[in-house]
Amino acid sequence: QYYREMLDILGGPRDLFRELNPAPAGYTWNSRENAFIKKEAVDDRDMQRLDYILAVDQVPGHRLSPLQCSVCNLVAPKALNSPNLPEGFDLSDHYGIEAFFTVE
């Protein structure tokens, strides 16, 4: 419900993660996979997508070429060479989204 409302308020942008990844949920806040997140309450909504990369193809008064995105994936900021950290421990409480674009 809130996702649709957000897209409507923003004028219907394209969700690039969803375009390129139609099946995966793409949770960027997920305490079931990310040990860095402390689950504070039993009713915590611990599986959500809070990060987005949105493309706007129409701006009133301007002619735009549609932005072409070739890759759009979740990125977990992992601790490199840190043997003292437990398995699955990430350096952030949420995952970001990484995208690559073709610019002509």
Image: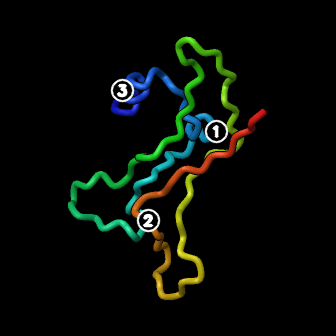
Provide residue 33's location: percent of width, then percent of height: 45, 64
SS class, disc 3 = helix
> On the picture, is 58 further left or further right than 32?
right
Residue at x 47% of width, y 82% of height: 85
Judged left or right of residue 92, residue 14 is right
Looking at numbered disc 3 in the image, what kind of residue is underneath it? Glu
Tell me whether the residue at label 1 lies in contact with that at label 2, contact meaning CB atoms closer than 8 angstroms.
no
Instruction: Depth check: give the residue in front, 64 or 13.
Output: 64
The 10 Å Cα crowd at callout 1, few under 14, some 14 to 19, many 20 or more, is some
The spot of residue 60 in percent (x, y) is 53, 13
The front one of 91 and 33 is 91
Contact (Cβ within 8 Å) of mark 1 with mark 3? no
Residue that badge 2 annotates? 92
Under circle 1, the secondary element is: helix
Q: Position of residue 41 (x, y in %)?
A: 21, 61
Disc 2 marks a residue whose amino acid type is Ser
Observer-nearest of 12 and 39: 12
What is the CA distance from the residue labelled 2 to the residue labelled 3?
A: 27 Å
Q: Who comes first in sequence, dot 2 or dot 3?
A: 3
**Image quadrant occupied by the C terminus:** top right
Which residue is tagged 1?
Answer: 20
Q: In the visual, does 32 lie left or right of 41?
A: right
Direction right: furthest residue: 104
Q: Label 3: how many residues lie within 10 Å, few (<14), some (14-19) or many (20+)?
A: few
Which residue corresponds to mark 3?
Answer: 5
User: Residue 46's quadrant in the figure?
Assistant: bottom left
Farthest bottom residue in view: 84
Q: Amino acid at mark 1?
A: Leu
